[in-house]
Amino acid sequence: MSVDRLSVFNNARTLLNSISVDIQKGAFHCVIGESGSGKSLLIRTILNMTSSELSYQGQIDINLANVDAVFQDTTSNMFQNIPLDKHFDMLYQAQSSKLTKSERRVQLIEMMTAFGLEEPQRLLKSYPFELSGGMAQRVALMMALISKSQCLVLDEPTSALDQKNSQKVMRYLSKIMKEKQMTMIFITHDLNLVEDYATHISIMKEGHLLENGTAKEILQHPKDDYTKKLIDIAHRRKQYAYNQTTV
């Protein structure tokens, strides 16, 4: 997937300014920036999910048939009057899954356990409106992983989770990505969350792409002052969290 000199405008206001980025196959590519940086707008533009009131310049090369996405408003894509086990049944059928019913149940329970979801048998009988924000995010991730998509786009998929469960999700996503040879695009404001998993990082601020490269290049040799600031803040937060656990 590639983006070449993409700009997005709302009348005279520039929302994204000449963004160019290549997403390599098999990459765990993280787009990092504060709220309002344009990272979510970039992804929604790439996925052709933006308002018709916006105008665009530039080129996007992507096969949307091979892409699945999970956004923060996770339950909006679920039927509120259908229990979760029926949702999963429909997904497996849509994917023409060759797994037996018992094999599907084993797979679902394995994912729920890996994601820190307790009482999986009971949860499968729950309805979407009964889920907390964190539970809904993890269920949405499970649904995306069942698909046969080659690329998964995740927009702040752990924003409702605590640090412990966020790390569980990250470890499982990394594991599945490698097993399925998937490409993952991960949108976040939390550098600490992704630094152990990212292969590539893009740093955004106010609609501009400030830095883009391998995770090693960005984390060890940042060029932009804003990137250096983000890394410094992330390190101080990590140290503070560590100090709190050792008190």
Image (cartoon, rainbow, N blue to C red):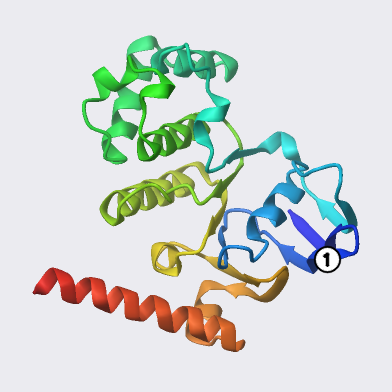
**Residue 226 in view in this figure:** yes
When asked about the image quadrant of residue 150, the answer is: top right
Percent x, y of residue 169: 36, 47
Question: What residue sits 35% from the left and 26% below the top?
Answer: 107
Q: Nearer the viewer, residue 158 or 10?
A: 10
- In the orientation shown, which residue stands out farthest toward the left? 247
When asked about the image quadrant of residue 40, the answer is: bottom right
Percent x, y of residue 224: 61, 87
- In the orientation shown, which residue stands out farthest toward the front? 12
Q: Left or right: 71 with respect to 54?
A: left
Q: Nearer the viewer, residue 99 or 82?
A: 82
Question: What residue sits 53% from the left and 46% below the top?
Answer: 181
**Residue 5 in view in this figure:** no
Local SS, label 1 = strand
User: What kind of residue is marked 1?
Assistant: Thr
The quarter in which the C terminus is drawn is: bottom left
Percent x, y of residue 55: 89, 53
Asked if residue 157 is positioned above or below residue 123 in the image, the reply reads below
For label 1, the crowd category at 10 Å Cα-Cα, with few meaning under 14, some 14 to 19 and many 20 or more, is: some
Question: What residue sits 35% from the left and 48% below the top?
Answer: 161
Q: Disc 1 designates what residue?
A: 14
Q: Nearer the viewer, residue 36 or 175?
A: 36
Question: What residue sits 74% from the left and 39% below the top?
Answer: 64
Q: How many marks?
A: 1
Percent x, y of residue 8: 83, 59
Q: Left or right: 145 with respect to 224?
A: left
Asked if residue 126 is positioned above or below residue 2 in the image, the reply reads above
